[in-house]
Amino acid sequence: MRGEAGLLADLAALAIPFEAHEHAAVFTVEESRRIDADIPGAHTKNLFLKDSGGAFWLVTVPAAARVDLKALPEAIGCKRVSFGKPEEMERLLGIAPGSVTPLAMIDAEPGSVAVVIDAGLAQAERMNVHPLRNTGTLGVAGADVLALLRHWGHKPVIAEIPVALPAG
């Protein structure tokens, strides 16, 4: 596992600018909202999913998005999805729930998890993601997150993520 030290080394080696913020541990989007107010840029949440064919997916979306899980498979090109188990996340990405981030793909075997980035985030000037732990936030350009994923041997999918409309 290369972990956070490997991540910081790759950011330096690829000359990718970022802004780091340390904060109290956050486990939910609700908890992170209190911290996000002080950090500029697009805030994210991540879904670790498994499709009915057994493939794993890491989907990064805007923090406020309510993803339509029924429509998602068609948008990203997979079968019906459900949430992956924490032990599968730990085995494949080396992280625990609450710390999920596309940057965890540094420790994922290429091809083991498909990574999907919301189209708007991919174009964001600044996308805020965890640095493999939920006590920090890194602000990185969406294009640079994609560059890191490709550097690590992954083929990120950029997709328009379907959102569920509020009830009522």
Image: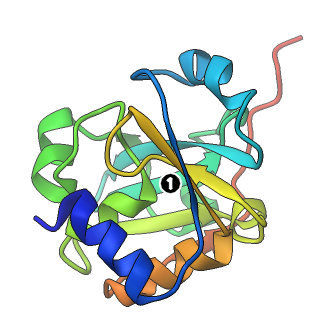
Residue wearing tag 1 = 59
Residue at 39 percent of width and 51 percent of height: 131
Specify whether 163 is left or right of 109: right
Specify whether 20 is left or right of 160: left
Please determine whether, in this image, residue 54 is positioned above or below residue 65: below
Residue at 10 percent of width and 52 percent of height: 91
**From where the camera sits, is residue 113 visible?**
no
**How crowded is the residue under tag 1: few (<14 C-alpha within 10 Å), some, or many (20+)?**
many
Specify whether 107 is left or right of 149: left
Residue 121 is situated, as x and y percent measured from the top left of the image, at 71, 61
Image quadrant in which you'd find residue 120 = bottom right
The front one of 150 and 136 is 136
Residue 50 is situated, as x and y percent measured from the top left of the image, at 31, 50
Residue 53 is situated, as x and y percent measured from the top left of the image, at 28, 60
Tell me the kind of residue under disc 1. Val
Question: Helix or strand or loop: what does disc 1 sit on?
Answer: strand
Residue 13 is situated, as x and y percent measured from the top left of the image, at 39, 88
Across the whole image, how many numbered discs are drawn on residues? 1
Specify whether 25 is left or right of 168: left
Residue at 61 percent of width and 44 percent of height: 44
**From where the camera sits, is residue 56 visible?**
yes
Quadrant of the rendering where the C terminus is positioned: top right
Residue pushed farthest top? Answer: 168
Image quadrant in which you'd find residue 84 = top left
Colour option used: rainbow
Residue at 37 percent of width and 46 percent of height: 48
Please determine whether, in this image, residue 168 is positioned above or below residue 43: above
Please determine whether, in this image, residue 6 is positioned above or below residue 66: below
Quadrant of the rendering where the N terminus is positioned: bottom left
